[in-house]
Image (cartoon, rainbow, N blue to C red):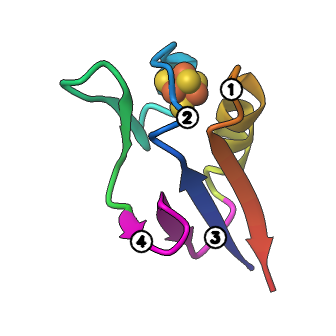
Amino acid sequence: MQYKVTLDRDTCIGTHSCTAEAPKYFRKADDGKVDLFNATFNEEDDVWELTLDDATDLLDLQNAEDGCPVDAIEVEELS
Ligand code: SF4
C-alpha cells in the first residue's frame, strides 16, 4: 500500500505541532512555516506532496494531520 502526504504551505500558520508529531517529515523553515522533507511541488494543486511506499510512519503522519489547526496536512491511501 502506498500513501500520499500533502502540505499546503499557503494555509500553514506555523504552529509546529506537526514537527513534534512527525519530526522525520516536517521541519521548521526559515519563514516560520514548515517544509515537508523530500516533497515535490505540485503546481496544479499548489501543494507539496510526498509518496510513501509503506505504512511505517503512518501513525505519526496521521497524528500530524489530526493536530494541524488549519488542515494544511492531508494523508491519504493511494489505490
Ligand atoms: S501543524 Fe499545520 S499549521 Fe502548524 S506548522 Fe504544521 S502544517 Fe503548519
Image coords of residue 20 (percent x, y):
51, 19
Q: Name which residue lies at 56% across and 17% down.
A: 17
Instruction: Tell whether circle 2 marks a residue whose Cβ is less than 8 angstroms from ligand 1.
Output: yes
Q: Name which residue lies at 55% across and 34% down.
A: 11
Image coords of residue 69 (percent x, y):
70, 20
Q: Earlier in the sequence, mark 1 or mark 2?
A: 2
Q: Earlier in the sequence, mark 2 or mark 4?
A: 2
Q: Which residue is mark 3?
A: 54
Q: Which mark is residue 70?
A: 1
CA neighbours of label 1 inside 10 A, class few (<14), some (14 to 19), many (20+): some
Image coords of residue 23 (percent x, y):
44, 31
Q: Are marks 3 and 4 in contact (CB under 8 Å)?
A: no
Going by the numbered disc 2, the residue's amino acid type is Thr
Q: Nearer the viewer, mark 3 or mark 2?
A: 2
Q: Are marks 1 and 2 in contact (CB under 8 Å)?
A: yes
Instruction: Tell whether circle 1 marks a residue whose Cβ is less than 8 angstroms from ligand 1.
Output: yes
CA neighbours of label 2 inside 10 A, class few (<14), some (14 to 19), many (20+): few
Residue closest to the far top: 15
Q: Helix, strand or loop at disc 4?
A: loop
Q: Which mark is residue 11?
A: 2
Q: Nearer the viewer, mark 3 or mark 1?
A: 1
Q: CA distance from mark 3 to mark 2?
A: 27 Å
Query: Along the horizontal axis of the image, is 39 left or right of 55?
Result: left
